Amino acid sequence: MSEKRRISLVAGSYERFIWGFTLNPNKQTLNPLFSYPSHLSLIKSVAVSGSVVASGGSDDTIHLYNLSAASSLGSLNHHSSTVTALSFYSPPHLPFPRNLVSADADGSLAIFDADGFVHLKTLPVHKKAINDLALHPSGKLALTVSRDNCFAMVNLVRGRRSFCCRLDKEASLVRFDASGDSFFMAVDEIVSVHQAEDARLLLELQCSKRVLCAAPARNGLLYTGGEDRSITAWDIKSGKAAYCIEEAHAARVKGIVVLSDEATGDDEPYLVASASSDGTIRAWDVRMAATEKPNPLAECKTQSRLTCLAGSSLKFKQPQAGKKNAKVEDENQMVTDQ
């Protein structure tokens, strides 16, 4: 069986369109895959795992897509308010996601089995809208930050909130690092780095303006973007900026993706993608950033006001004829009705 690599990017917009692209770094092109008016109003979040895409919008729905076939898989209507954040749990030994977790403006999390997208449970976590959620690589734990100025940990195996504390200010973003040993929270222009085991503060990253998006890489860097229109790579051990692509976009940066292989956990060592509210998606060869201001490796203008970005760089083998992927039971499967 021949091995191939598929690099995909998906973006959501204020104009309710979802955009799909394939990136060819050798030819330096971003090729349109689809554009679909999937929601009735603006799209707040997108998530990608393998060939499966999910988008959540202010019309209270989640839409699902098959990236390989560029087709719709239908919608999920279990939320009664804006879907604010989405995340797939994808075990490393499976070529497809095991679960989808979504957050909404009522402060709740919904958990779905990705095999058929069966709704498993909805958990009340916060009193106000959840701004962001992050899943631990084990699939057992979720972190949430909310407009109620609180930070919470959710035990996804037991299906309940296990910890909640009040923050000095409202956090807009939360992310685990690639290993799951630490996590990041963004409050305005400050990104704090915490130990995952006990939430102990390790250090703070001082950005020039408000941070709107972030993406960790396995090489110990954290990429941030936001109101400063730049992409900054932070060394999370020293707390210092490793390099910065200044004025990466003409408007605020709304999404950053470090293109990684979900099946093996390997990162492309130099490919980073970003999306701006001016409608431009760009792919970068960050190897050039240490010596000079790089030009985009590839770019595409969607003519939309982009709100979010997700992507994957997945190695896969052509399946043998007549065989289908069997569902594999995972000991870390998120459970609900216990």
Image (cartoon, helix red, strand yellow):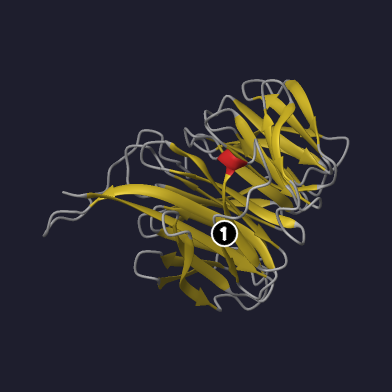
Q: Which residue is rendered at x = 73% and y = 20% of the image?
A: 202
Towards the viewer: 79 or 208: 208
Residue type beneath disc 1: Val
Q: Is residue 253 toward the left or the right of residue 50 in the image?
A: right
Above or below for 136 versus 278: above
Q: Is residue 24 left or right of residue 59?
A: left
Front residue (pair 312, 145) = 312
| Residue at image point 76% right, 40% down | 186
Q: Position of residue 335 (x, y in %)?
A: 45, 41
Relative to 30, does residue 90 appear above or below in the rendering?
above
* Extreme residue toward the left, this view: 322
Measured along the vertical axis of the image, is residue 77 above or below residue 327?
below
Is residue 149 among the parts visible in the rendering? yes
Judged from the image, the secondary structure of the residue bearing numbered disc 1 is strand
Task: Tell me where residue 161 sits by quadrant.
Answer: top right
Look at 76% across and 47% down and name the residue there. Answer: 172
Question: Which image quarter: residue 72?
Answer: bottom left
Residue located beneath label 1 in the image: 46
**Viewer-closest of 18 and 121:** 18
